[in-house]
Amino acid sequence: GLSLPARLPGLGGGGGGEKGALLAAALGEGRLADALDAVEPTAALVTSMLAMAERQGGWSARLAAEQKAALTGAGPEAPIDAAVLDEMPLLHAFALETLRTQPPTRPQRLRLERDTAAGGVSLPAGTVVAAEPFVGHFLPADYASPDSFDPERFLGAGGGPPPSLGLCGPAGEAGEASRQLALAVAKATFVQLRRMFEIGVALDAPPPGGYPLHALPDSVDLKAVANMYYELQRGAAKTSSGLFYEKD
């Protein structure tokens, strides 16, 4: 099988396990480099989650409380693995709703190999088609009050179909396993950033934009104030005299 790289920040060490199995299922042995197809969409989702948490103060507080409970007793170097993420259903719902309302990319285009019909429309072989999340994610038939940001919709049954991450290349072709891995990496990165730093995003920051990657503009600055990061430094950094700082 295929295991994760030596270390993904916040996900713990390398080796197999659930994440390694997901990656193997998604990409197939010997195709690890193709995982890069998911890097930019996943990073765009993380920044959108950080910005949305800033705008949705009530949800930011709920996520912080859930994260604190899930990580109680865990040190700054403790991995954020699948078991930890399973303890944060609010985070999962928040990530899905951010992905629904601010999809980072459009799925790749497909060319039909044979004649077909969809919605009463005849499509001959050779027609180029593509899913459009900026339409599909806002269909009232699938999502109640689709223009409202409401992660609660994904906390129970009947919240609507899973939103698309829009992965392209082999990662996109791999389907659900690849999507689940990318979503897990986004959630773990979000948690790691918020436990190591106090993240601030300007409330008047422009919304995500751009094509083909739909993300916060490069001009938007994220303010990061060291939080638990200091604990990590005090326990690991050498001084110029060769002594180690001691943890409190």
Image (spheres, helix red, strand yellow):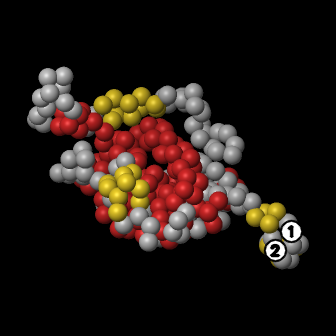
Q: Earlier in the sequence, mark 1 or mark 2?
A: 2
Q: Residue drawn 48% across and 57% down? A: 183
Q: Neighbour class for label 1 at 10 Å: few (<14), some, many (≥20)?
A: few
Q: Residue drawn 18% across and 33% down? A: 234
Q: CA distance from mark 1 to mark 2?
A: 6 Å
**Residue 148 visible in this rendered orientation of the protein:** no
| Image coordinates for residue 248, horizontal then vertical, percent | 10, 35
Q: Nearer the viewer, residue 37 or 1?
A: 1
- Residue 16 vs 189, above or below: the answer is below
- Residue 86 vs 116, above or below: the answer is above
Identify the image quadrant of residue 218.
Answer: top right
Question: What's under tag 2, amino acid-wise?
Answer: Glu
| Image coordinates for residue 229, horizontal then vertical, percent | 27, 36
| Image coordinates for residue 151, horizontal then vertical, percent | 47, 55
What residue is disc 1 on? 126
In-image side of 113 versus 211 (left or right): right
In-image side of 176 versus 80 (left or right): right
Q: Assign the N terminus to one quadrant of the image.
A: bottom left
Secondary structure under the numbered disc 1 in the rendered image: loop
Of all residues, the one furthest to the top in this rendering is 240
Numbered badge on residue 182: none
| Image coordinates for residue 246, horizontal then vertical, percent | 11, 34
Q: Nearer the viewer, residue 170 or 40?
A: 170
Question: What's under tag 1, amino acid-wise?
Answer: Gly
Please report contact status of discs 1 and 2: CB closer than 8 Å, yes or no: no
In-image side of 145 versus 72 (left or right): right
Secondary structure under the numbered disc 2 in the rendered image: loop
What residue is disc 2 on? 113
Q: Residue drawn 17% across and 37% down? A: 235
Identify the image quadrant of residue 85.
Answer: bottom left
